[in-house]
Amino acid sequence: MTAKIALEAKQLSLAFGGLKAVSDFSLRVPERGLCGLIGPNGAGKTTIFNLLTGVYQPDHGEIWLGGTRLDGKKPSAIALAGLARTFQNIRLFGELSVIDNVRTACGVRARSGLVRSFLRTPLFLAEERAMIERSYDLLDVLGIAHRADEQAKSLPYGDQRRLEIARALATEPKVLLLDEPVAGMNTQEKHEMRSLIVSLRERFDVGILLIEHDMGLVMEICEEITVLDHGVTIASGNAAGIQENPAVIEAYLGAPEPDEPPSQGPT
């Protein structure tokens, strides 16, 4: 049985002035799928994430999350629709506690408005208790519940990455976009993050699309991989096919030097 598609990009294009940043990009992430988006530096990977999450609006193309069209919507509306992301450069509320970083993200789904919060109505108080409980549960899953009361900026780098994922999950996404989740981690941290990413889709019933420069991680866990080069898709498929694709090899390693002409020797 064919898996239902959770996230679909159709022929997205974007130009900055005369520079074509993305050309006719298409992608599908199945429900509970684990997909990778790779390419050399400057290939356009983060631009794709910015298009999917409403930071940029495409010049052409469509973005669908289930039956909801996302292109043209603001980032806040896209988050509410069920698409969440982390960032290559971690963006936490550094002065807030770990638990408050996650609790703030839970507020995306809150039903009590400003008036109820000001009056501290029963609905507001019930939601507050539920958000705090959910926040602790997420921190526990990510392995950092013991740091709940610490300032986010004081966490070790690997735990900051975990906190950012917990905060994204707090919005109850249907699809989670991870931008270089193991960047800057040591071997042990990478191994732990690999296991965590694999477990998230089952635990939270979420599709995952990740950008990552660690090719070992991508090839191990991703069922479908899309390769970008200068904003153009040059390959897509499973890990085995991607590793053997000549266009991918050239994009990462460069075109081979042409063979030197044979020596003519003396005549």
Image: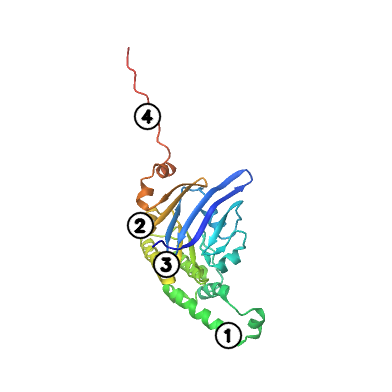
Q: Is residue 216 above or below residue 19?
A: below
Mark yes or no: residue 142 visible: no
Disc with the residue nearer the chain's start (4 vs 3): 3
The x, y position of residue 67, in whole percent, is: 54, 64
- Determine crowd level at label 2: few under 14, some 14-19, many 20+ residues with C-alpha closer than 10 A: few
- The amino acid marked with disc number 4 is Asp
Query: Tags 4 and 3 in contact by the CB under 8 Å rule?
Result: no
Query: Tags 1 and 4 in contact by the CB under 8 Å rule?
Result: no
Mark yes or no: residue 247 visible: yes
How far apart, in angstroms, are the residues tagged by discs 3 and 1?
30 Å
- The amino acid marked with disc number 2 is Glu
- The amino acid marked with disc number 3 is Arg
Q: In this image, 242 relative to 75: left or right?
A: left
**Residue found at the far right of this picture:** 115
The residue indicated by pointer 1 is 125
Q: In this image, 110 relative to 135: left or right?
A: right
How far apart, in angstroms, are the residues tagged by discs 1 and 4?
74 Å
- Secondary structure under tag 3 reads helix
The residue indicated by pointer 2 is 220
- The amino acid marked with disc number 1 is Leu
- Determine crowd level at label 1: few under 14, some 14-19, many 20+ residues with C-alpha closer than 10 A: some
The residue indicated by pointer 4 is 259
